[in-house]
Image: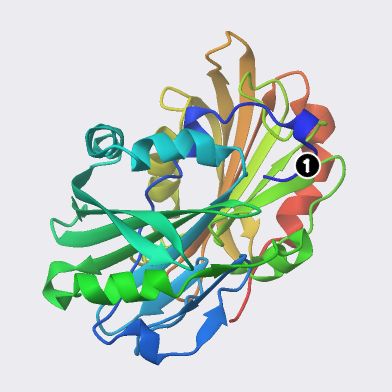
Amino acid sequence: MTGAENRRGKLGPARLAALALAALLAASPAGAQERKPVAGTSVSLAAPKGFEPATGFAGLMNKATQASVLVVELPAEAHAQLSALFENADAAKAGFARQNVTIAALDRVDVGGEKIPLLTGSQIAPNGGTFDKWIALFKGEKTVMLTVQAPKAAKLAPATVKTMIASVSLGKEPSLDDKLAALPFAIKPAAPFRVIDTIGGSGALLTVGDRDTDPSGTQPLMVVAYQTSAPVKPGQEEALSETLLKGTRNLENATIAERRHLPFAGGDGMLLRGGFKHPSGADKAFAQYLAIGPDGRFVRLIVMADESAMPQLQPAIDQTVASIAFTAK
């Protein structure tokens, strides 16, 4: 997130849960490649052969092996909180177990004379496959978490991962416009909504109000995210929409009052609208829009606000929804 320090609150667990998203590496030494910037981030690195810039998230992808490298940037102050997980193997094992990641070892990689912590482990995918996983934590203008993920069958060598991590350099944080331009979808927020930041190169976080962090949930919140997992078939919009809604923090027991198809992201979209009780006790309303693109990937927009505020926000929501479109990369 961006914004002056006096607007930042302590990061809530939902933001830190952005911890372990996945990523990659292949089988040839990264040192043999030229260091290149990762679009929409402050990171430059030398990628192993076979890896190309990803189109659905901030990072790299090897289509042949399905290995990936994901770059997630968080506020600078997140480093103090996250480093506690990366300085102690037992803490790392306990913390990442909540994300279904099994940590096996804590190592260190020399990056420009600085010892960068590197966690090594594995994760079982929803389809039952097992992925090797490496997670490194860097400190720059932003807190940078770099996650490497590869199927066991890819046999990605730890030495290859360490060589790639050793090549990492952190530059100036890109502008918000540059981050938005790197997303796999177009968005033009309508006032009073404003973009706080992008999320992992595949989503955008918006709010109404002065605070960039709002643990109490008093400000309206909008999240727009692009799918980075396996593609889905058109026609599954309604079932998928409900599954995603029930898997969203605080919306597990939401009441759906309206379901209907409507144009969204250039195609046939699905709208779910209803209400839920916030942990603060406040009555909240939500609206979720979802559309599946021509490649089987989907984009999802969800907005949450006090029930009393939602009618006044609806024109701005409608304008923002109308601006969403899949982009060709």
Q: Quadrant of residue 282?
A: top right
Residue 99 picture location, percent across and down:
30, 40
Outermost residue toward the top in this view: 281
Q: In percent of the image, x 49 and y 68: which residue is there?
A: 112
Is 229 situated left or right of 54 in this image?
A: left
Name the quadrant of the N terminus: top right
| Label 1 sits on residue | 3
Q: Position of residue 109 (x, y in %)?
A: 34, 62
* Residue placed most toward the observer, 102 or 136: 136
Q: Position of residue 53 (x, y in %)?
A: 49, 80
- Of residue 309 and residue 269, the one placed in the foreground of this image is 309
- The percent coordinates of residue 329 (x first, y second) are 58, 81
Q: Is any part of residue 66 visible from this angle?
A: no
Which element is circle 1 on? loop
Residue displayed at 77% across by 64% down:
177
Looking at the image, which is closer to me, 201 or 84?
84
How many numbered dots are placed on residues in this image? 1
Q: Residue at x 80, y 42 (%)?
A: 193
The vertical placement of 253 against 249, above or below, is: above
Say if residue 157 shows up in the picture: yes
5 up-or-down from 104: above or below: above
Position of 110 relative to 123 (above/below): below
Q: Residue at x 31, y 56 (%)?
A: 108
Which kind of residue does numbered mark 1 sit on? Gly
Q: Please determine whether, in this image, residue 190 is positioned above or below residue 153.
A: above
Q: Quadrant of residue 86?
A: top left
Task: Give the quarter of the image for residue 310.
Answer: top right
Q: How is the image coloured?
A: rainbow
